[in-house]
Image (tube, rainbow, N blue to C red):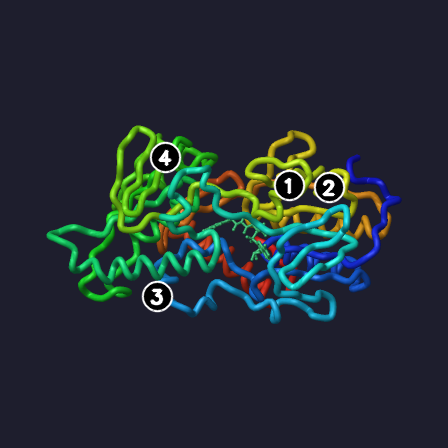
Amino acid sequence: MPGSDPTVRPEGPAVVLGAGYAGLAVAQGVARRSRGRLPVVLVDRHPVHVLRTELYEIGRLARAGADTGAWTLPLARVLDRRSVEFRTGEVRAIDLPGRSVTLDSGPLPFGFLAIGLGNVAAYYGVPGAAENTHSVYRLTAAQRLAAALREVEVRSGSLPGERRPRVLVVGGGSTGTEVAAEIAATDWRRIAGPGARAPDVLLLTGSLPFLAGFPADVVRRARDVLRHRGVVLVEGWNVTNVDPGRLTIADGSTFAFDLAIWCAGLEAPPPVRSLPVAHGRGGRVMVDPALEVPGVPGVFAVGDSAQVPDPDTGALAPGTAAAALAEAKVAAANLVARWQGRPLAPFRYRERGSLVSLGPGSAAGSVRSVTVWGSPAALLKRLVERDYASSVGRGDPPHLS
Ligand SMILES: Cc1cc2nc3c(=O)[nH]c(=O)nc-3n(C[C@H](O)[C@H](O)[C@H](O)COP(=O)(O)OP(=O)(O)OC[C@H]3O[C@@H](n4cnc5c(N)ncnc54)[C@H](O)[C@@H]3O)c2cc1C
């Protein structure tokens, strides 16, 4: 089995890069499984764990302003400092042969490594996309978007005639859908004043099918809810150019906008993309079935930074928090097994379902192959999110129920 060489036992601490869903769970898992005997250093640019799956809540973010407490958990509260040392720092590069990570503050040598640096927006070379659109993939970006949209709404009362602010959301996956529904459902007068006009929201789904991968009845229900919320879907054409205030799609049509949001794709962040190893889609690190980087014993990659195939079918695990947490559990066990010189176990992802928010009080998705929608689905999604946040806040092993 790949990754089962029990003779390789590097020396040095276990360094975990990224305190997101995957990294936090790996760090805690290694500390627990090694009973605190293997030193663990967790690194992130922020001293908080970001609840990234909730960053589509643009209306709430606009109301919250600088107070991001509802989307973050301070790592000082989450981590047991006796078993995991936390370092705030920017990961600049990873030197695999030299077994050292370059942080903005200097080098950090490692014996074992888990890479959980998530991903960043991919713009696929579309001119102007990075410069002229917002995104929700990071908390700071989602905050900026919320503040910018609030400003657009504050000014909307003085638009000529009946004109309403025009918001374009690019990307017909679950993130684009959630963001479009949320913005359309938000009462902007409560946020931006009584003169604010509700925005016109267009969702440009691109050439991929809308909500690709979701069951047909989930897609149908999502379409119905979006239509009901006034979101217009533009399907079938990728974006080719974004100028300030104007976007072009592949059939030559152009769309004027007051604010555009890029939810069209993701890729591995630069320190991951530049690693001298085999890469998969969007520069994700290809790992073996034990989640170890082939040829580099003791180095694992997890979550959105990794491309994880099923050992039997070859099907790739999805880029979700649920998959990241499942991978983290196995990666932590295998990292400790590597340290102890024991054989490693393969990872198999079992999809239990996923839910797409369709604005406050509404969602659609499937759970254990059963389609759920409407307010029960929204309640279920909220319960899963709250259960995750409170278990992490208590310092329990992170999990999604
Ligand atoms: C709006 C939105 C809604 C979503 N909804 C769902 C959902 O409902 N269900 C679901 O399962 N998934 C959902 N996802 C996907 C989910 O958020 C990701 O799959 C998940 O966050 C992946 O976890 P991760 O640990 O790999 O990455 P992240 O959670 O992104 O963690 C990466 C960490 O690395 C840190 N980092 C990155 N680069 C550096 C660097 N150079 N130096 C230092 N630190 C760095 C970051 O600060 C971050 O803390 C959603 C995503 C978005 C954006």
| In-front residue for pair 297/29 | 297
The tag on residue 63 is 3
- How packed mark 1 is, by other alpha carbons closer than 10 Å (few <14, some 14-19, many 20 or more), is many
Q: Nearer the viewer, residue 108 or 324?
A: 108
In the image: residue 378, left or right of residue 38: left
What is the number of the mark on residue 240?
4
**From mark 2 to mark 4, how far is it between C-alphas?**
39 Å
Q: Label 1 to label 3, Cα distance in Å? A: 38 Å
| Type of amino acid at the residue the image marks with label 4 | Thr
Identify the residue at image location x=56%, y=50%.
321
Instruction: Tell me which numbered mark, 1 or 3, is placed earlier along the sequence.
Output: 3
Name the residue that disc number 1 marks.
285
Amino acid type, label 1? Val
Specify whether residue 229 is in view: no
Residue pointed to by mark 2: 290
Q: Residue furthest right?
A: 7
Q: Residues within 10 Å of mark 3 (few under 14, many from 20)?
A: some
